[in-house]
Image (cartoon, rainbow, N blue to C red):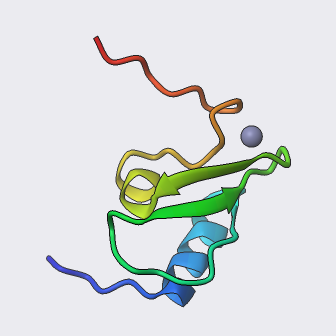
């Protein structure tokens, strides 16, 4: 399914589904890195796909990335 996301919908999703906030104000597609502000105060960058599909909804300090082997 190809759901169309707008920056407003993403912002809403971020606020409803995480403690982070979206700082980016324009959305250009799934490959774009968006800027978020974590609940701890750190800013972090992630694509929305990772944020949504991989549940990476916090900064690397609060949620360290899994090391791929
Ligand atoms: Zn954090």
- Residue beneath the point at 65% across and 49% down: 44
In the foreground, 1 or 30: 30
Give the image quarter of residue 8.
Answer: bottom right
- Compared across the picture, whether 8 is left or right of 41 comes to left
- Compared across the picture, whether 20 is left or right of 41 comes to left
Q: Is residue 53 above or below residue 15?
A: above
- Compared across the picture, whether 9 is left or right of 43 comes to left
- Residue beneath the point at 57% across and 52% down: 45
- Residue beneath the point at 28% across and 11% down: 69
Give the percent coordinates (x, y) of residue 50: 40, 51
Give the image quarter of residue 2.
Answer: bottom left
Give the percent coordinates (x, y) of residue 34: 54, 64
Q: Is residue 17 above or below residue 61?
A: below
Q: Disc count in the image?
A: 0
- Compared across the picture, whether 58 is left or right of 7 comes to right
> Splitting the image into four quadrants, where does ligand 1 fall?
top right
Quadrant position of the N terminus in the picture = bottom left
Give the percent coordinates (x, y) of residue 43: 73, 51
**Residue lying at the far left of the rendered structure:** 1
In the foreground, 28 or 61: 28
In the foreground, 69 or 19: 69
**Residue lying at the far top of the rendered structure:** 69
Give the image quarter of residue 66.
Answer: top left
């Amino acid at each position: 399914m190809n759901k169309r996301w707008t920056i407003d919908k993403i912002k809403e999703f971020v606020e409803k589904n995480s403690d982070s906030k979206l700082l980016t104000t324009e959305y250009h597609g799934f490959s774009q890195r968006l800027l978020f502000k974590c609940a701890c105060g750190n800013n972090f960058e992630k694509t929305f796909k990772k944020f949504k599909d991989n549940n990476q909804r916090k900064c690397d300090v609060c949620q360290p990335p899994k090391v791929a082997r």
